[in-house]
């Protein structure tokens, strides 16, 4: 039988490392971290986060909105969690629609 504490520790460590790597200067590293974070977004328990700790959805929205590399913004947009898991809300819709004015034509088309 698996130890639930070990699983929680592993998840916490993985999540923390990926959150750091999503802000990496190398866009290839950020891309991979964003893809992995988007897969973890559905299993994140927001209640268990520490005070002031950023959620995975917030990180994805920040990368989509503020990252200088177009390929990182593209990855954030393409791997954004499905509407069934995270419906478009007043918090998620504006950052997605703002990408219609992105400097990268591919990002604009993807929206």
Image (cartoon, rainbow, N blue to C red):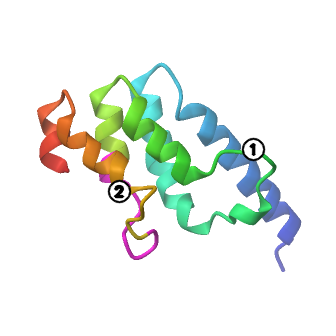
Asked if residue 12 lies left or right of residue 27, the reply is right
Secondary structure under tag 2 reads: helix
Secondary structure under tag 1 reads: loop
Q: Residues within 10 Å of mark 2 (few under 14, many from 20)?
A: few
Q: Residue at x 62, y 51 (%)?
A: 55
Asked if residue 13 lies left or right of residue 95, the reply is right
Give coordinates of residue 3: x percent, y percent.
86, 71
Asked if residue 62 lies left or right of residue 16, the reply is left
Magenta span: 77-86
Give coordinates of residue 109: x percent, y percent.
12, 45
Q: Earlier in the sequence, mark 1 or mark 2?
A: 1
Between residue 56 and residue 17, name the one nearer to us: 56
Give coordinates of residue 103: x percent, y percent.
19, 27
Tag 1 residue: 52
6 lies above or below 61? below
Task: Please identify the residue farthest to the front as the structure is shown.
Answer: 90
Question: Residue 86 sits in which quadrant?
Answer: bottom left
Q: Residue at x 29, y 32 (%)?
A: 71
Question: Residue 44 sits in which quadrant?
Answer: bottom right
Between residue 26 and residue 110, name the one nearer to us: 110
Q: Residue at x 35, y 56 (%)?
A: 93
Q: Is residue 82 magenta?
A: yes
Asked if residue 101 lies left or right of residue 47, the reply is left
Question: Residue 6 sits in which quadrant?
Answer: bottom right
Counting the numbered discs, the total is 2
Q: Is residue 36 magenta?
A: no
Numbered label attached to residue 93 = 2
Give coordinates of residue 110: x percent, y percent.
17, 49
Instruction: Considering the whole magenta stretch, tell me its main secondary structure.
Output: loop
Q: Residues within 10 Å of mark 1 (few under 14, many from 20)?
A: few
- CA–CA distance between discs 1 and 2? 23 Å
């Amino acid at each position: 039988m698996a130890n639930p504490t070990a699983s929680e520790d592993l998840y916490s460590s993985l999540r923390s490392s990926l959150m750091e790597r999503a802000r990496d200067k190398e866009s290839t590293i950020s891309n991979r971290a964003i893809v992995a974070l988007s897969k973890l977004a559905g299993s994140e328990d927001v209640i268990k986060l520490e005070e002031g700790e950023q959620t995975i959805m917030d990180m994805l929205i920040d990368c989509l909105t503020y990252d200088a590399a177009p390929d990182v913004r593209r990855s954030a947009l393409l791997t954004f969690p499905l509407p069934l898991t995270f419906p478009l809300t007043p918090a998620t819709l504006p950052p997605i629609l703002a990408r219609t004015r992105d400097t990268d034509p591919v990002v604009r088309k993807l929206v």
